[in-house]
Structure formats: structure tokens, C-alpha cells
Image (cartoon, grey):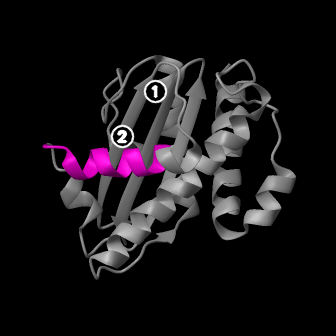
Amino acid sequence: MITRRRFFRTALTLCALTFLHSPGIAVGQSTTEGADVSGPWGASSYDFSLHVAKSTFETINRLREMRGLPTLVADEAIGFVSGSHAGDQIMGDFVGHVTPNGLTLWHRFADAGFQVADAGELIWNATGLIEWNKEDIAQRVVEDWMQAKTGERGILLDPGFNIAAVGTALREKRIVVVAILARR
């Protein structure tokens, strides 16, 4: 079970990052293997998830650019951590920065063998039949983070953050989006 779950999270994260760098390649290489083909979008759930990750990353960068902040560079290691945490929340049926067994973002970075000087983690969760398109979800995610009262806005607009990734996970009628912004 753990091996299969890690494969799914890793495949999703790596494909999402490939898609961020070369949109044509990821669409051609994406597969439904390991994806939730019984999800609300059927066999296209996997591609949908990749597109949501890409659109959310691009929406964050547009927001930062409009405010005169440096744009973020996609980072594969952070992508692994964000994708893994999104998958853990779906598989473990929880939402939060701390897992049910007490692991934090810093534990997840250590487990991945990755070190940063500072980082912020953003989580968005929706349950039910989601009828928005990929770009609408990305816009809604970023708007919700900007309006949140718990520090998300500060993370999105931190001028010191220069690397980031967005991980997504789907199951049945639920989507989780995890963005991690960091500085080395």
C-alpha cells in the first residue's frame, strides 16, 4: 500500500512539474495509471489534477508579478513534498499542515532530504461536485488564500520566496491543493 501510494504521489508530482516546464510533453505523457479514474472527472481526473496544479502555479506568479514581486521558479523537491502532502490528506481523510501522526512541513522536508531557509505552506480543500474548469479552480484557490485570515496572504506575497511548487490530489468528489513557497 505504501509503495503504491508513494508511486502515485511521485508520478503525479513529477508529471505536474514536467507540465509546468513543457506543456506539450506532459499532456502526451500523462497516464491514468495510479489516478482516481472513478473520480468526478472519470478517466480525465489525472490530467485535470495536473492542469489545476499548473494553473494554480501560474495564477500565483501572475499575482506576484502584478504586485511587483519576483516570480517563483518551480522546484522538483518542493513539488515532491507538496504533492505527497496533498496525497496524504486525500488518503488519510484529513486537512491540515500537521498530519494525524504529528508531522509538520519541516518533517516532510527532512524526510525528502531537502533544506530551505524559510518556507510557507498553503492548503485548499473542496468537497462535493466541483463544476468549475481548471482555471476557475486555480483563481478560486488563490483568491481564497488572499482573503484568508490565517497568514496565507503573507506567504503568497513574501518577496523573499523564490522557489515553489503546487501539488494536487483528487478522490471521489474531493480535491486538495497544496502550494509550498520557499527560499533557499
Contact check, label 2 and label 1, Cβ < 8 Å: yes
The residue positioned 40% from the left and 31% from the top of the image is 125
Q: Position of 145 compared to 90: left or right?
A: left
Q: 31 or 77, which lies in front?
A: 31
Quadrant showing the C terminus: bottom left
| Image: magenta residue range | 137-149
What residue is disc 1 on?
89
Whether residue 81 appears in this view of the structure is no
The residue positioned 65% from the left and 47% from the top of the image is 50
Q: Residues within 10 Å of mark 1 (few under 14, many from 20)?
A: many
The residue positioned 20% from the left and 48% from the top of the image is 147
Above or below residue 51? Residue 156 is below
Task: Answer whether residue 139 is magenta in the image.
Answer: yes
Quadrant showing the N terminus: top right
Above or below residue 38? Residue 85 is below
Rendering coords of residue 162 (x, y %)? 38, 74
Rendering coords of residue 58 (x, y %)? 50, 64
What residue is disc 2 on?
123
